[in-house]
Amino acid sequence: MSEFTVHSIPGSPFGRAVLATLEEKAASCRFSSVAPGTLRSPEHLARHPFGRVPVLKHDGFLLYETQAILRYLDRVLPVPALTPADPKRAARMDQVMNVNDWYLFQGVANVIVFHRVVAPRVMGLAPDEAAIEAAMPKARAVFEELARLLGEQPYFAGDAISLADLLVAPQIGFFTQTPEWSVLGAPHANLVAWLARMEARPSLKATTWERVSEMAKAA
Ligand SMILES: N[C@@H](CCC(=O)N[C@@H](CS)C(=O)NCC(=O)O)C(=O)O
């Protein structure tokens, strides 16, 4: 199996989902750090015309969009399978992955996590409280729905971990570092237990912001 290269930024939750999926598959990869100021450089736009991360390179094949990358990895590295064989469970996995991209990230994580965690840490900026307050109604609805979809199952698609868990856990993990967690996540005991289960996995432990920063320095 030829090498996987992951172009990403330490701290990117989408990048972490890719790295954690490779870890679950026990596949090694090369981490290629993209400096945030170079997302619009010709070199990066050639990899990702929308100027985002992550991007996967494998056998000369370049791929962006995290869901596509995760599904590609699950096809080229089929063991252990991270997509349920049962059509209904697979559909639930797909649904949760889209909830992640369309409702959890857009207008919720990219506002609340950005202003509470990323901007202070990376840019030294104070949180925009008005923007956070405006994001809260959608945030409450998203967390309620994720808790409902998880229900009493150990993982979003049932008894086994799937790509959905690996996509969502890096996003939700960030919220625990915000005061909003007390009203968004903490009231949902099933989500709290699921996150603890996810964060105890070696794949998540190996891909924290700090660990990926070390990878970036070593590259
Ligand atoms: N739909 C994309 C979203 C990727 C994304 O938004 N990545 C963030 C980092 S977590 C990014 O590149 N942000 C840079 C920017 O917004 O300029 C995917 O699934 O890969």
Image (cartoon, rainbow, N blue to C red):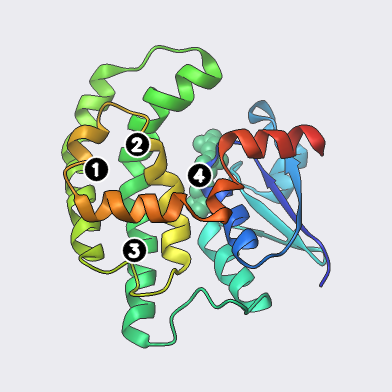
Q: Is residue 196 left or right of residue 153?
A: right
Q: Residue at x 33, y 28 (%)?
A: 178
CA gap between label 1 and label 4 equals 17 Å
CA gap between label 2 and label 3 equals 17 Å
- How packed is label 2: few (under 14 Cα within 10 Å), some, or many (20 or more)? many
Three-letter code, disc 2: Phe
Helix or strand or loop: what does disc 3 sit on?
helix
Q: Earlier in the sequence, mark 2 or mark 3?
A: 3
Label 3 vs label 1, nearer the camera: 1
Give the labeled residue for mark 2: 175
Residue 92 picture quarter: bottom left
Q: Earlier in the sequence, mark 2 or mark 4?
A: 4
Give the labeled residue for mark 4: 13
Residue 128 picture quarter: top left
Three-letter code, disc 1: Gly
- Tag on residue 185? 1
Label 1 vs label 4, nearer the camera: 1
Q: Earlier in the sequence, mark 1 or mark 4?
A: 4
Residue 42 location (% of width, % of height): 75, 38
CA gap between label 4 and label 3 equals 16 Å
- How packed is label 1: few (under 14 Cα within 10 Å), some, or many (20 or more)? many
CA gap between label 2 and label 4 equals 11 Å
Helix or strand or loop: what does disc 2 sit on?
helix
Three-letter code, disc 4: Pro
Three-letter code, disc 3: Val
Q: Are marks 4 and 3 in contact (CB under 8 Å)?
A: no
Q: Is residue 195 left or right of residue 2?
A: left
CA gap between label 3 and label 1 equals 16 Å
Give the labeled residue for mark 3: 96
